[in-house]
Image (cartoon, helix red, strand yellow):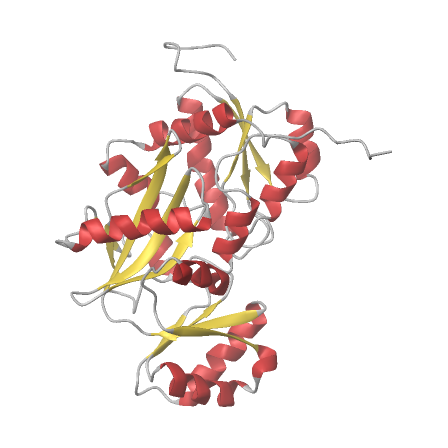
Amino acid sequence: MVPVGGSAARRLNVAVIVGGPSSEAEVSRASGKGIAAALAEKGHTVARIELDAFTPESIREGGFDVVFPITHGAVGEDGGLQGMLEVLGVAYVGSGVLASAVAMDKPTAKLVFHSRGLPLAKGQAVRESDGAPLSLAKRLRAQIGSALVVKPTASGSAIGVHRFGADDPDDKIAAALAETFRLGDGALVEELCAGREVTCGVIERDGVPTALPPTEIRSEQDAFYTYEARYVPGRSQHICPAELGANVALVQEIAIRAHRALGCRDLSRADFVVSDERVVLLEVNTLPGFTGTSLFPEAAAISGMPMVELCDHLVIAAWKRGPTRRNEARPLPT
């Protein structure tokens, strides 16, 4: 491509992939709009492409130097889209197929985190075939504790997440389990950990992951950081850098360790519950949001990398890396 503003500056032809068959499609489209504007401001040529059956054709015909997927949830963030981009042989921003798939499936990600000794909430994954919702609710309370969180195994933006205190009846938990089973293949049920909601982004520079300043999220109108609290301007308060004392370094260390454990690439964002007694890792997002209220670009800006520089950094890194290396086919021995 043609250098501009020095040897390090390049104009690229970038496809930003948005939407898809996901409950978070509108979040993705909002993220994609912001990314496209930032890349255009930096001098790149940008096309926003909807994730659908025609996406492969659009990518093949577009002559793109790099693809920036900013899809959230099913198909776009779980390795499906990443697999398609691998087949097409194009460079793309973000984690590969395996890391994307493992991070999206919360019970599988927890197994990986556990194997690396990362601090986790006590919990159990269940499926509809494991029993009637009410009997499951009673059993899970006996095994995990009386205060629980019920969440889909593969979803984001707090969609389908329910929290229950010790005084809530079993039938309310049973109703949440039944609703969660309608959303997907299973539910992850965990102890309700007391503490502050904290998130910490990780960005790679020359392949080395670096933690961004952690952010504490306060949602005074909501029981927790709900879908509405995330995306309605002013509904939540973000304190960045978070005032966590000695736990700041610990949160950053765990975020980097989780990023590495999953084999993430380019960027990720880890979510936590933090109290004076413990730091609990909840999950890792391989494609965090880039909307006007999103946490990752906000923390990056506070660290000295505003939105325009952040998006430029990510597409340049992916372009330099290029498509996944292909090995030549070996002839059958004769």
Residue 9 horizontal side relative to residue 213, left or right? right
Residue 169, can we see it? yes
The residue under the point 58% across, 78% down is 128
The image shows residue 20, relative to residue 323, as above or below, that is: below
The residue under the point 34% across, 65% down is 120
Which residue in the rendered view is the most extreme toward the left?
245
The image shows residue 47, relative to residue 302, as above or below, that is: above
| Residue 217 in which image quadrant | bottom left
Most foreground residue, 83 or 23: 83
Quarter of the figure that contains the C terminus = top right
Q: How many dots with numbers?
A: 0
The residue under the point 47% across, 21% down is 44
Across and down, in percent, residue 31 comes to: 44, 42
Across and down, in percent, residue 125 comes to: 49, 73
Most foreground residue, 182 or 229: 182
Which residue in the rendered view is the most extreme toward the right?
334
Across and down, in percent, residue 88 comes to: 67, 33
The residue under the point 51% across, 61% down is 154
| Residue 274 in which image quadrant | bottom left
Residue 77, can we see it? no
Residue 331 horizontal side relative to residue 240, left or right? right
